[in-house]
Structures are given as C-alpha cells and as structure tokens.
Image (cartoon, rainbow, N blue to C red):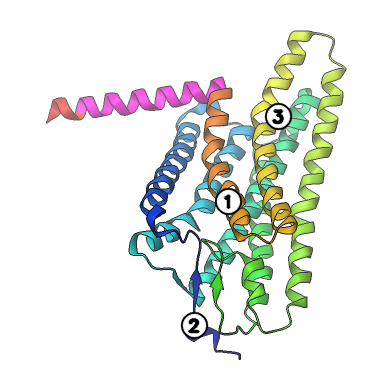
Amino acid sequence: MEIRNETRNFLLLGFTEPDLQPLIFGLFLSMYLVMFTGNLLIILAIVSDSHLHTPMYFFLSNLSFADICFTSTTIPKMLWNLHTESKVITYAGCLSQIFFFFVFACMDNLILTVMAYDRFVAICHPLHYMVIMNPQLCVLLALGSWCLSVMGSLLETLTVLRLSFCMNMNIPHFFCDLPEVLKLSCSNTLINNIVVYFVAIVLGVFPLSGILFSYSQIFSSILRISSARARYKATSTCGSHLSVVSLFYGTSLGVYLSSAATSSSRTSLVASVMYTMVTPMLNPFIYSLRNRDIKGALGRLVSRAFLSNGAVARLS
C-alpha cells in the first residue's frame, strides 16, 4: 500500500534498549562536545596564527569545518530523540539529513584528496611549491570541492523525491541512511541505485585513486632521498594526513563491508557510529598531537584566552 510521502514520518529505531538510553545519551553528548570543541579549536588556531596561513592548514581548516557539519547533521537529532524518548523524523527532515550527510561526507573525501595533492607537490616539487599552490589555486580547489559535493548530494536527494513509500517506515539506524530508506520504498529504485553507484565512483573511487597515486609518488620520492634525517622530515609531514585518510576510509569501508557481509542491523549500526562520530572526533587529536605548529598555535590561543579573561576580571 503506497502513501503520500509528505503526510508520513519515518521512525529512527537506532538504539532501542530503554535501560541503556541514559548512558548512550551521555556518551554521545560527550563525544559530540569533544568533536565540536576540538575541530573548532583547530579552525580558530589556524585563523588566528599568521604562521599557519599556508595551503596545508587552509585545507585542514576546511576539513575541520566539514567534520563539524558532518557530525551535526545526525548526532543532535539522535540526542534529541534519546532525550524525548521519541524516534520520529519527518519526511522533510529525513530528506534534509540525506542531503547534508552526503554534502559533508563528499566534502571530507574531496578535501582529503586535495590535501594529498598538496603533500605531493610539497615533497615531489618543493622548489615550485609556492608557485603551484598559490592562493588562487587553493581557493579554487576548496570551492570546487564544495560545488562537487553539493551537486552530487543534490543528485542523490532529488531522485528520492520520485519514490513512494509503504506503511513500514522503520529505519534501523539513528539517522536517515539512504540505503535503508531505499529499502522502504514501494517504487522501483533502479534509477536511485544507479545514481548511488555513479556518485560513489565519481566522488569516492576517483578521489581515493588520486590519494593512492599521490602517495605512490611521495613514497617513491622519499626513497630517493639519501639523508635519513631529510627522509624522516618528509615522512613526518605526511603522517597526520595519512593517519586521517586511513581512519576515514577504514571506517567508511567498514560500514559497507559489514552491511554486505551480514544482515545484522546492530553490526551496521556500530560501524556507522565509527564513521559518523568517532572519526571526526579523533581528527583534531591526530593533527594536534603529531603537528608541532598546531600545538604551538593552540597553546598561544589558549594563553590569549586566559589573559583576556584575566584582564576582564581585573577590570570588573
């Protein structure tokens, strides 16, 4: 039986254990606040420190902003549902979640690719780095990433509008996961599946191929360096980015592999938590712990904040 989409709500089943919901709420609220604060501090440190106004840190600030928005697309709604003991999300709210989820997921992917290209130029063509990675190119790469992400997400979301849904509107997730939404449709989803695979190849496989190619060239250049100290320095500049790339693709591939390997919604749910929450939360720690410039900028930022608070307290 088909129904009018606009008059129906979806139910996000997510975490259904009543006894554990207060614990889950506290855990995810803490993780969200850590993620938000950590990424915001990275952005503020980069903006406030002129020494960090370089291509690498410009892209890092974009990555941190995308991580904040990516997690904010799903987690606040989940926290609200846990707090109110409600599982309802409107049809319009579900479509909005799908759209913004794909925008910021694609943005994460493309920015990581651009950062890999930046490291490739810095290590393989160091004498021409400032000429190649000029401010105009950096802005164009960032804007291009945002535009491609929005267009890909629009393509994914608009094809959902053509679907009708049956009486079963239960989504076994804490957010509107597109594959799960498509399973609930009474309509033929062939076009939707084609679009999903097309966007995944264009905005997923191609960027990953670009990252792999960049690092193959980087490692080849590093192996040709005779000095052990220079080799270590070149490797260390890629360490943080390579860690974030491994975490991002490891968790995202884990979601889809776990979904394909098992029909258990619980396994898929845990994998989705890693992808949507844990990875964005860990990224600021990876960059701040492994990067001396970021640690120095964060220290200066915190010192200025304490000095400003002290001055205000003395005046009052």
Q: Position of residue 189 (x, y in %)?
A: 73, 78
Q: Secondary structure at mark 3?
A: helix
Residue shown at the point (48%, 21%) measured from the top left: 296
Magenta-drawn segment: 291-311
Q: Earlier in the sequence, mark 1 or mark 2?
A: 2
Residue 52 part of the magenta-drawn span: no
Q: Dot 2 surroundings within 10 Å: few (below 14), some, or many (20 or more)? A: some
Give 311 or 178, whichever is nearer the viewer: 178
Q: Earlier in the sequence, mark 1 or mark 3?
A: 3
Residue shown at the point (67%, 52%) measured from the top left: 255
Q: Amino acid at mark 2?
A: Arg
Q: How many marks?
A: 3
The residue beneath circle 2 is 8
Q: Amino acid at mark 3?
A: Met
Q: Dot 3 surroundings within 10 Å: few (below 14), some, or many (20 or more)? A: some
Q: Position of residue 233 (x, y in %)?
A: 70, 16
Q: Quadrant of residue 287?
A: top right
> How far apart are the alpha carbons under marks 1 and 2?
27 Å
Instruction: Please name which of the two marks, 3 or 2, marks the residue nearer to the observer.
Output: 2
The residue beneath circle 1 is 270
Q: Is residue 143 visible?
A: no
Q: Quadrant of residue 124?
A: top right
Disc 1 + disc 3, Cβ < 8 Å: no
Q: Dot 1 surroundings within 10 Å: few (below 14), some, or many (20 or more)? A: some
The prevailing secondary structure element of the residues shown in magenta is helix
Instruction: Please name which of the two marks, 1 or 2, marks the residue nearer to the observer.
Output: 1
Q: Secondary structure at mark 1?
A: helix
Residue 295 part of the magenta-drawn span: yes
Residue shown at the point (80%, 43%) measured from the top left: 210
The quadrant of the image that shows the N terminus is: bottom right
Disc on res. 130: 3
